[in-house]
Amino acid sequence: MLKLIRACKIYHNSGVCALREVDLTVPRGAYMSITGASGSGKSTLMHVLGLLDTLTDGRYLLGGTDVSALPPCELARLRSERIGFVFQRFQLIPGMTALENTALPLALQGIPRGERQRRAAQALEAVGLSDRLAHKPGQLSGGQQQRVAIARAVVTRPCVLLADEPTAGLDPAAAGDVLSLLDRLHRAGNTIVLITHDRAAAACAAKRLYLENGRLSG
């Protein structure tokens, strides 16, 4: 489903080589974690996989399509349709309810209002928040906000879910709930790549990889 071939990323303004000939295959239905110290290249790898950044050299195949040289407008379309993101800081819109935040990606795709509200409500029910549809982020705990973010990530039915430090900043109980939710999503057939510095969180994945100085090892 996702395949990097000798992927390299150099930031020419700083001379930093963030990724060094990385080979990575993420099969459909996989649950994979990638750990590494700060500065190891984890964020760069997530940005490349999520079509937020492009490679300096090498190839990236998404669903069999080489996206390495696609124009920004096409990358934006693929990102909207095929990638689900879960971020450390939730990135929910404060003035919107849980339902509205979850439905937002569908609105950006032009899905009719009734359909996107139905799908958003289903996604929130799947993460255990069917009783919080009208709550705004400030009325939710950190763990509940992260579950809304996960519902928003899966509502478009993406081909892969990229989770970047999804448990950072959460208390142990809330972090455990998020990891249990990711496990349920995986067992339901979702493909997940978890990027984290937390080795306990990484151990929840079926396959664990390590990134150091831009090089990936298993």
Image (cartoon, rainbow, N blue to C red):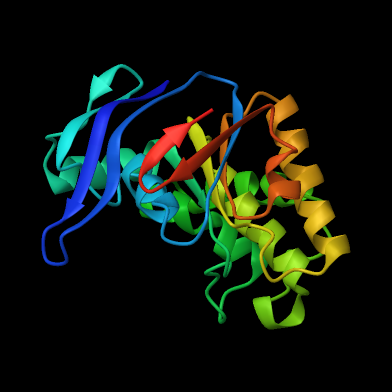
As drawn, 57 above or below 6:
below
**Residue, far front:** 213
| Residue 117 visible from this viewpoint | no
Image height check: is 24 above or below 136? Answer: above
Residue 56 in the image, given as x and y percentages of width and height: 15, 43
Quarter in which the C terminus is drawn: top right
> Of 129 and 184, which appears nearest the observer?
184
Rendering coords of residue 100 (x, y %): 57, 64
Left or right of 127, for residue 63: left
Q: Is residue 179 above or below residue 67?
A: below
Residue 192 position by quadrant: top right
Residue 38 vs residue 121: left or right? left
Counting labels gives 0
| Residue at the image point whose x is 16% and y is 47% from the top | 73
Q: Is residue 205 visible?
A: yes
x, y (%) of residue 16?
Answer: 22, 58
Image quadrant where residue 57 sits: top left
Quarter of the rendering occupied by the N terminus: top left
Residue at (43%, 35%) from the top-left corner? 216
Compare residues 215 and 141 and report the one nearer the observer: 215
Which x, y percent locates residue 102?
58, 57
Name the residue: 75% across, 36% down: 183
Q: Is residue 59 left or right of residue 193?
A: left
